[in-house]
Amino acid sequence: MAKIYSFGRTGVHPDERKDYTENKPIEKVKSGEFLYVAVNQHIGAPAKSIVKAGDRVLKNQVIAKGDAPVTSVVHSPVSGEVVEIKSMIFPNEQKNEVIVIKNDFKDEKVLGTETKREFKTNREEFINEIKNGGIIGMGGAGFPTYVKMNSPKDKKIDLLIVNGAECEPYLTNDYRVMLEYTNDFLNGISIVLDNLSIPECFVGIEENKIKAFELLSERVEDKRIKIKLLKTKYPQGAEKQLIYALTKRVVPIRKLPFEVGVIVQNVSTIKAIYDLIVFNKPLTERVLTCTGKGIKEPKNLYAPIGMSVSEIANICGGIYEECKYLINGGPMMGKPFADISLPITKTTSGLLFLTDEEVTVEEENPCIHCGRCLSVCPMGLNPTYLKEASDRREYEKMDDVLDCIECGSCSFICPASRELASSIVKGKQKYTKYLKRGK
Ligand code: SF4
Ligand code: SF4
């Protein structure tokens, strides 16, 4: 029996609800007539469109880029014509520029892309290739992968961790990638280890994905890669918690994993790296889970980035009238949205179409001082204290909000339905602005 790893006693156990899609093979989706490609899909300095209405673009052509040290490029998922560049409001009230491309269905690609190639080079060129391929963290955060890989020279990286926890309820996209693209995934890990000279890799997979754990354990040939079983618990896949669970290394407060010699990558990001390095294919499509009782046929889809949510919903048989909530991502950390004309992005791991039956909305009640929020917080914070300080803008008490990983465990467990996480997240934004203003 394999050893089971976990990050400690904190965390919560939400209903998994993965059964809607866990046995549904990934369906490849063809691009429709219009693609809506967001210019900013990453964390970091904004990118800017480098095309204009009327321009013809090829598939895999760079259409947006930035020049700051932390930014990302965006490629066209189809060949066709740019018909408009417009502004749209994304989940979390984020205003974003969107390049609207009319697909000509000719599938004309930039020369040399999507062609098998020999890629033998050095660390710098590899990292540059990852940058030019527009690869960003596909687990939801969207941090540019080339930045993550480019750790300071004095920090020796001795371990790559691949996050196969997929601890958010409902989502099964990483699970299906591990099951269906097993060899690409394992080869992708070897490519990263070779090019960054990292001696070892742990792939962490929760117990509820035992088939993936068994399949990878059976197929893995590269002795540097070890498949590890994690306890099913939320947020087992949060970066600091995952590192601690698998290595007992503690990433210092407000520091990054390279401080403890680790780089963490998500499953889909590894697959995207494989596609880029082996087939010269930039990141223009991804696997996502469309699920919930509000959608007629829940599915795992391999869809072009820029496809609208309404089109995705139609591919899944349409939305039931009872669907009341739309969430981009998982139910714990995902962001609600109402506009189904919005497109999917590189970080859309899932689209949840939920009914009243699946969502409990209760009025906030006074705190009964039960202490449960404290006992589950994986960062050891005091959520009730931070909520009050955030609501009242008591900046002198708010410094800890910066350590909140926005996991939502405190709100999930609260018997008084206190809106802890959302207040703390807002507090984090207010406090960051306050610090920038110079207090
Ligand atoms: S305070 Fe932040 S890190 Fe702690 S449980 Fe709440 S959301 Fe998660
Ligand atoms: S879990 Fe809710 S009721 Fe209990 S201490 Fe925290 S805020 Fe108060």
Image: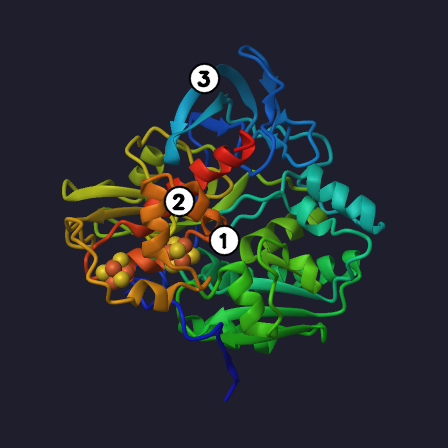
Count neighbours of disc 3 (C-alpha within 10 A) and say few if under 14, some if 14 to 19, many if 20 or more. Answer: few
If you read the primary sequence from the N terminus, does the residue marked by circle 3 or circle 2 appear first?
3
Q: Residue shown at 51%/61% (left/top)? A: 180
Numbered disc 1: secondary structure: helix
179 relative to 291 in the view: left or right? right
- The yes-or-no answer for disc 1 within 8 Å of ligand 1 is yes
Task: Tell which of 301 and 69 is nearer to you.
Answer: 69
Q: Residue shown at 57%/58% (left/top)? A: 253
Q: Which residue is mark 1?
A: 403
Identify residue type, mark 1.
Answer: Asp
Ligand 1 rendered quadrant: bottom left
The picture places residue 146, in percent across and down from the top left corner, at 69, 45
If you read the primary sequence from the N terminus, does the residue marked by circle 1 or circle 2 appear first?
1
Count neighbours of disc 2 (C-alpha within 10 A) and say few if under 14, some if 14 to 19, many if 20 or more. Answer: many
Q: Residue shown at 31%/32% (left/top)? A: 340
From where the camera sits, is residue 63 visible?
A: no
If you read the primary sequence from the N terminus, does the residue marked by circle 1 or circle 3 appear first?
3
Colouring scheme applied when the structure was drawn: rainbow
Q: Residue furthest top?
A: 54
Q: Residue furthest front?
A: 396
Identify residue type, mark 3.
Answer: Lys
Front of the two marks 3 and 2 = 2
Q: Which residue is mark 2?
A: 425
- Give the Cα separation between the discs numbered 3 and 2: 28 Å
Q: Residue shown at 72%/73% (left/top)? A: 224
- Vertical position of residue 48 compared to residue 372: above or below: above
Residue 86 disc label = 3
- Give the Cα separation between the discs numbered 1 and 3: 35 Å
Numbered disc 2: secondary structure: helix
